[in-house]
Amino acid sequence: MHTVILGNGILAATIAFRLTKRLAAKDRITIIGKRSRPGSATLAAAAMLNSFAEIEVGSLNSELDRYRFELSRAAGRMWPQFEKEIGGPPSGGGLELGTYVVNNTAADDLDDENFDAIVAALREFGEPFEPVAPRDIPNYMPEQRHRATRALVIPGEGWMNPRLVLERLDAILARHPQVSLVDDSARSLVRQGDRISAVKTEGGQPIAGDSFVLATGATASDVLRESDLGIEVQRVFYGVGVSVEIGSPDFPHKKCIRTPNRGLACGIYSVPYFTGSGAAQDHVLVGASNFISPTPYNYGRLTSIESLMRGAIEQINANFYRADLVRINVGWRPTTLDTYPLLGRSSIANLIIASGTKRDGFHLAPLISEKIVAMLYDEPVDEGFARFAPERKPIRSLTRQEAIDKAVRHQMSASYQHGFTPSKSRMPAQIAQMHRDDLERLHDKVGAHDWGIPPEMLDMYRYGHAMA
Ligand SMILES: Cc1cc2nc3c(=O)[nH]c(=O)nc-3n(C[C@H](O)[C@H](O)[C@H](O)COP(=O)(O)OP(=O)(O)OC[C@H]3O[C@@H](n4cnc5c(N)ncnc54)[C@H](O)[C@@H]3O)c2cc1C
């Protein structure tokens, strides 16, 4: 069997890695993707391995969301063993544990509700955690006005440097005699009858194969559009995210410190960023911004960079004002119209799609790769996974009322996060009402009478990209 994998991010690399363990003598794997990895979400990630710290109010309301949460927890449990399988950390820089969640007053009381939701989930699932005094958090020295009033530590949730993990996977794949790496972009898939026969690359090279895995992250829809395969797969958008790597020799970080999710993004977080053995252990990755775009967006916006740097100084450690700016990462979170992942076999039997992981694709990679490899070998995969089938109708998990309520909360939270200081009047309530009226009109305009637009997708519906 010759398996051709389009893309070279964490999903493609972990799928290829797991496949190498099962190759028969005549089997081959080809991985297509530019070495420079344009738009790579993986390289921009922290990468936190969070399940509970990502909980928000309502995250566990539906049975589907509970299933997704269980997958997230299962993936978290897989990482220690998976890390060993890919060679373990050569000397430090591997999986680290210990995530502090701080409840501060930098945004609005959505943070308080989300913090409470995290505590409730930790209790419900019996996950170990401890309330901590904010002043006892290592290297946590926020500005006075932005200090946390509550905090907790989740000892079992951690992070990894995704660049080092990809380096390790790249090295394993590059030296494997049955793996070929093609330093090019996939332009389209070629359909012949009821099968895919080949991939056409930007360089014009056709690459034939037996099975194809589309794992190009946020560009998956562009490849499908070029291919004109006659299948309907909901659109994957570019969730443009910025993270900032800083050097902080005087105040090095020891643990992950983050807020709950807020304002349509993941709040502000900071993780120690190990850059290699022998290198100074004082880099910190600060993340992350998010805006959804229908097209690739190559640069970080100044507002994203400014708010991350300000957030790190105000909300994590005021001494970061003296830190060095090492690198600004811009990555595209593959974000689907319904915000759930696309994972599974398409109606073209030899085409599998693995994309749409949005905010936790690094964390989920050991689990997703295991399932995708099982699919490639026609082995059974647990039934729940079928709900992420790539050709499903978009999942409508929110009612119109829930979606509007949530969007208003997040829009207000985002405004406070970006410095909104209302006058001493009914202004916040009036602005919330203005958002609500606007959202009601938008729902009417797109015919969303008995379903709700996922808050992240509002602009895609507003500007006509959701139907395209
Ligand atoms: C700022 C930021 C922070 C994040 N933080 C976290 C985190 O803390 N924890 C977590 O779990 N997740 C995090 N994520 C999300 C995570 O990074 C993604 O879910 C995951 O990396 C997606 O992996 P992927 O392999 O599908 O896509 P990608 O990593 O984007 O990989 C796709 C690859 O395919 C290549 N490619 C694109 N088009 C083509 C083509 N036509 N042909 C061939 N190759 C192509 C790209 O260059 C890229 O290398 C974060 C994302 C961002 C942007």
Image: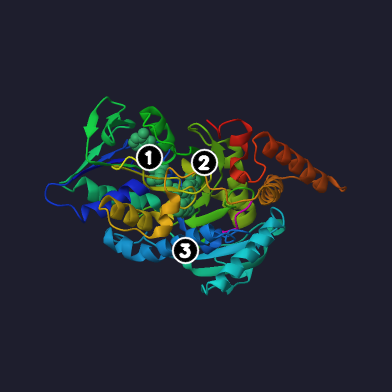
- Mark 2 Cβ and ligand 1 under 8 Å apart: yes
Secondary structure under tag 2 reads: strand
Secondary structure under tag 3 reads helix
Looking at the image, is 122 positioned above or below residue 329? Answer: below
The answer to which image quadrant residue 319 occupies is bottom right
Location of residue 279 by image quarter: bottom left
Residue receiving disc 3: 70
Magenta residues (range)? 258-262
Magenta part mainly helix, strand or loop? Answer: loop
Q: Earlier in the sequence, mark 3 or mark 2?
A: 3
**Is the CB–ligand 1 distance for label 1 below 8 Å?**
yes
Place of residue 30 in the rendered image (x, y in percent of width and height, measured from the top left):
23, 41
Marks 3 and 2 in Cβ contact (< 8 Å): no
Along the line of sight, the residue nearer the viewer: 30 or 452 = 452
Q: Relative to 85, does residue 16 appear above or below in the rendering?
A: above
**Which of these two is toward me, 264 or 224?**
224
How far is the residue under mark 1 from the one under mark 3?
25 Å
- Mark 2 or 1, nearer chain start: 1
Q: CA distance from mark 2 to mark 1?
A: 14 Å
Residue kind at label 1, given as amino acid type: Thr
Mark 2 lies on residue: 239
| Residue 266 seen in the figure | yes
Please provide percent x and percent y for residue 363: 43, 56
Q: Nearer the viewer, mark 3 or mark 2?
A: 3
Number of marks in picture = 3
Q: Residue furthest right?
A: 425
Can residue 42 be seen by looking at this rendering?
no
